[in-house]
Each structure stands twice: as structure tokens, then as C-alpha cells.
Image: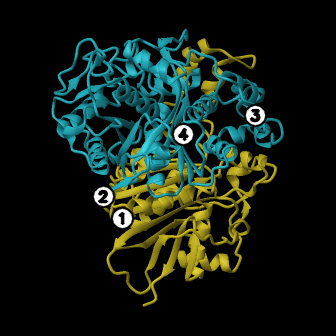
Amino acid sequence: MYVSLKMGKNVRENEIWVTGIGIACSAGTSFTEVTQSILDHRLCAQPTGLTLPVPMWGVCPNEIPSHPHFVDDRKSLLGLFAVEQAMHDAKSPNGPYSIFMGTGLSSITPAQLEEDLYPFVKDGIFDREAMAQDLHRQTAAPARHDPHRFVRFLKEKYNATGPCGTNFSACAAASQAIAEGMRVLRRGQAKVAIVGGHDSMAHPMGMLSFVVLGALSSTRCRPFDKRRDGFMLGEGSAVLILERAEDALKRGVIPYARLCGAGSSIDAWNVTAPHPQGVGAERSMINALRDSGLHHSDIDYINAHGTGTPLGDIAESSAISRVFGEHTPVSSIKGALGHCIAAAGAIEAVVCLAALQKQFLPGTFGLEEEENFEINVVKNAQLISISYTLSNSFGFGGQNSTLIFGAIN
Amino acid sequence: MAIVLHKIGLATPLGHDCDDFVNKIEHQTSVITSLEPLALLACPQGSMVQDLSIRSIIKKRKEIKLYTRAAKLALLAAYRCVGQISKLDTALFVAVGREPPDEGSAEKCLIASQRDGIFDESLLADKGRSLYPPLLPLRTLPNMILAHISIQLEIMGENACWAGGEETGIQAFQSGFWAIKEGRCTQALVGAADSFISLGAARDLHRTQIIPPSEAGVFFLLKEKETPEIGDIVVRPNQKEHEMRHYLLDCIGYAGAAQQLLELVFSLHTQENISWGGLSFQKQLQ
């Protein structure tokens, strides 16, 4: 069904448009910078300088403004930066607002260890009784460990009266948060959805937790490469402003793209390893195609989760080849930016929007000798006409999420 | 097509039988007492679920060490709700609380990584690294609660893990309801689990003045049904809000993300029609 608008354009009823973008990651702190970086096929990750066996990480190179509410919380500072940039970019639409953000684990920085824990070391062990009874000194800790802290803050800042939530689905969190915002708008439960993700594990204890799991590369991330051995950790935040097309048209804003649909699934297989044939990933992509009313042949570009882990790339490429065959172009940006964990789905959604706007296929930085996966992996960025892009995000624990974006005709 | 609340599963300090749970709240039965795990706190009062055995439920017993208290509560409640099902199109939406604290397993690593109270990254990379418990990250990721349920009960459909305070349960419930309503699944397992029964979590509660600490798991199975039968609870969208009565604090204490869904269980058993969280719950009378 189509809705006629006085501007003379027709849009599908309940069509959701992206009208604002905010981003901060290793590729830059604006949509323009990030787009150019991906077009230039540039390595954005930097040496860590750590003694831990983690040579590279994708940290945000620009200074992020501080905020008194989040002095000890870098991921929320990154998130706030992206939210404010996205709202400004969308020309601050009127609410009611709905807010959904994907988030990750709270940080354990050296400063926090020195303030919270090390004062209790006595004779080489922690004095647990003193720690238990210390109720007054470190009162910031409970707030820092509240995963809903950032959304609660935004809810108050923007007086959001629509549904709001914090998604904690690991690396699928931001993608699922974006999907939820889309659905809330389709139902008419809000006029504007502020959606995305934010995360920063770029501190020694954060790195160690991935080192012990064997998830990080000993050199650098090489998605779909024969020598792939894990990912590089990244940090960042990306935020999209979503509106129903008819509301955005009435405001006269120029949208970036349409958010056509979303799907999710669970592997129900293993807490760390993906299903070997990627059956969950396959269902997630099929659910997204069904939700968007598109055929697999409509998709012009797939932004893979593509972590560069030995098992992850096998599972995903197997799923992609069953759903799309071997011709649809596929690439991963994690070799350039690093894996931004809970923010990855939002940052990669922005890469899909950049591809639609500048009409190009992002390349796969780090790919040198391609594994024979029977999919069409794009090595270098290419200018090409595209209409629909699909973005995969798969989380620890087997949660899969897929988003589909379409160009505005 | 109606959406009905098919079954409820509980794991609470007041027991796991719904009628018993409701009856104890109606009679203001308090199970708050001094708890051994909180003995080092100045005020060790709280309530806890005594039997958290999941050995008979899980497929791989060696995975028990990956389960936090909240994960065990969640699996027990979810299992009581649905039993063993294998459904591709069953959705799973779970509300979880704050990150479960490490109960000392990383202590040796942290101590080995400092010199005179100052963190030293090279010590972490050397001695600290070898002392870091490799399974700790898998315990502290809150969405592992959802992962465990999906693996044990073979649930593979649409899903999300929502995190935060007691309002988070509403989000999980709504997600499941709308997933059915919008045709993304035919049934949805929705619920919440949280536990403050540890020194670190209970201390945080004491710091924020919300006491006493408790824990619980609560799950609901929502199903599509062509013709609701007498006694079925039919769930519909509704904008009116019902004022929840907060009896639970007196009976068990604070159960975080599970709190509001436990209040919902009580309200559903004591009233015929209620409106909550943008939804109405109405018992089919004829």
C-alpha cells in the first residue's frame, strides 16, 4: 500500500528512513571521514604498544568530549558523541522519541583497579571483609556496572516517552537495537527512533579477556583469508536517527536510505563457536529478506560479520552461499577498523549507508590469499551501482542479526 | 488469531509453584533472613533460592561451571515453563540485570598484575595472564543466560537480550508479544532472571540503598491461538496502565530484572483484567 503526500512523492506505508547519522570509530568521527576511509581502503587500526600479545587495535583517533556523568565510562562518551552528532545531522526532529542502544561490558581500566580494588590488597590477598563493608568510598561503581545507564541518561536528556531499551546481545546488540527501533516506528509507538550501539574494550583487562578466549589475531585481522587467525579489537559508536518516511518528508529532510527490514535467529549450538554450517546465520538472513519483502537476488552487497576467525568465516560464508549463491559481492571491514563488539552492527550499518550513498562496494582490508569459500569476496573497494545492502552481525552465544538497507529512489 | 499466555515458570525464594508463590505473597510471608553467602556484609539479610540444581536439565554437565546463579535461575524457570521443546520458530526474549560480579576467580591475576597498588601491564602480560581464569568472560557476559536457554531447550527463533533494571522485564515481554503479533514466530518464551546473592552484587545494592538483595527467574510462554478457551489469559496491545502493587520487597527483597515480571505473575493470579507495559491481560470467561 502506498501513501500519497502533498510533496507529490509516494512512499510505502510504514517505510522507515534513516535521516541522521553519528559515528566515532577508528575510521573517524564523522560520516564523511568514515566513508572516505572505507573508499580509500585504508587501515585504521594502530599498534597497541602493549606487552600483551595484541599488536593492533582500532581505537578512535580523535578526542571525544568528556561529560560529568560519564567521567569513567569511555563507551558512553563515544555513544553520547554519536547520538548528539546524529540528532544534529537529522536537524533535531520532534518526538515522541524511542531509544534503543546496544551496549557491551563495563570497563575495568587501570585507574578503576587502582581506585576500587588495589587499596584492599593486604598481605598478598584481597581483604574481602573490608571490601564487603566498604559502602561509602566507591559509590560510582554500582552505576558503572548498570548496562542500562546510558539509555536511562538519554531518555531523560531527550524526554523520550516511547519505548526505550538496552540490548545486550554481544556483537549482535547494535543490530538488534536498530531493528527494534524500526519496529517501534512501524507500529506507531514513537515518531523518532534513536538507535545504534556503543562499546569500548580497548583497555588491558578487556584485551586479556579476548586473549584467553583465543579470539584475537596474533598479527592483524584477515577476513576470508587462508591465514586468518582472529580479529583485532576496536571501539566506537554509531547512531542512526530513524523516522517514518511520511514524517521525514513533511519535515523536508533528505534521507540517507531506507531501513527495509531485519531478522534474527539463534544457533542453539555452542556458547563460543558458531554452528559449523551457519544454519542460524542463514535463518537470520532469510528472516530479514522476508521482513523486507525482498528476494535474495535484490541484494547488491553483503557486509559480512567477517571477523577473520577460523570458524566464524567458514560458518558465515557457508550460510551466504546457500542463501545468495556465489555471485553477490561480500566484504568485511573488520580488517581495517577492528571489531567494535556491541557497536559493530551499528558501525557496519553506517558502512552500508555509505556504500548506498556513494555507490560503491567496500573492500576487505587484510585479505591477501582468499580461502575458497564459494562466495564473491570483494578485495578492494569498487565503484558500482547498488540498490540494496545487507549487514550481518553475529554474537557470542549464537545470536544472529541481519539488517537490510535500500537506496532512496 | 489471539495471543494467549500459555504457561508460567518460576524459580523464586518463595518456591516454583505459581499458586504457592501467590498464596505466600497474599499472606505476606517473608523469607528474608541472614544468608551465609552475604555473611561478611554488615547487614547479611536477603532471600535466595536454595536448590539451584540443573544437572538433570543440561545436556553437557561440564558446562555447569559456565552458569552463574542468574543463568541457573533462568534455565530452571524456562524449563518449568516449556519443558523440552524443539522449535525453529519459537522466539526467545530475555531480560537480564547487571553484569554478574566475579566471585574471586580473577583475584590472583589482579594481584599479580600490580606493584604497590599500581597496575602494571607488563606484569599482567606475564604472570597475570597465566592466572586469568579462561572461562571468566563466558560467565560475565549477561547474554550467556539467553545462550544457555537456547542451547538446552533448542530455541532458534527471533531473539534479543535486554539488560537493565526492573523495567527491562517489560521490554522482553513486549518483544515476545509483538514478534507473534507481527508474524515473526508462533510462540515466544519471554522472561527475566537476576541475582544479587553475592558479596559484590549485594554490596552494590547496599550502596544504592535498595535492600534486601534477592534473586529469581521467571518465564512465560506466549502462543498464537485461533480460538481462546475459557480460562485462557488473552494478551492484547493496550495503552492504559495498571498500578502494580509492590508486595515483593517485603516478602523476598529486590530481584532486579525479574522484579516486575514477578509482580505480573501475582497480579495475573489475583485479578481478571489488568493493563501493564502497553499490554492488557484478560481472562477468557466464555
Kindly identify which numbered label has been placed on residue B89.
2
Q: Position of residue A180 (x, y in %)?
A: 46, 49
Q: Position of residue A72 (x, y in %)?
A: 70, 29
Does residue A13 appear left or right of residue A188 in this picture?
A: left
What's the colour of chain B in the image? yellow
User: Which is in the foreground here, disc 3 or disc 2?
Assistant: 2
What's the image's color scheme? Answer: by chain
Distance from Cα at disc 4 to Cα at disc 3: 22 Å
Say if B274 sits above or below A123 in the image.
Answer: below
Give the amino acid type for the residue marked by disc 1 in the picture: Gln
Report helix, strand or loop for mark 4. Answer: helix
Give the amino acid type for the residue marked by disc 4 in the picture: Thr
Give the amino acid type for the residue marked by disc 2 in the picture: Asp
Neighbourhood count class around disc 3 (C-alpha, 10 Å): few under 14, some 14–19, many 20 upward = some
Does residue A374 appear left or right of residue A19 in this picture?
A: left
Say if B258 sits above or below A334 in the image.
Answer: below
Neighbourhood count class around disc 4 (C-alpha, 10 Å): few under 14, some 14–19, many 20 upward = some
Quadrant of the rendered structure where residue A100 is? Answer: top right
What's the colour of chain A in the image? cyan
Distance from Cα at disc 1 to Cα at disc 2: 7 Å
Q: Chain of mark 1?
A: B
Neighbourhood count class around disc 1 (C-alpha, 10 Å): few under 14, some 14–19, many 20 upward = many
Please name the residue that numbered disc 3 is placed on: A127
Residue drawn 38% across the image and 36% down it: A393
Kindly identify which numbered label has been placed on residue B187.
1
Give the amino acid type for the residue marked by disc 3 in the picture: Asp
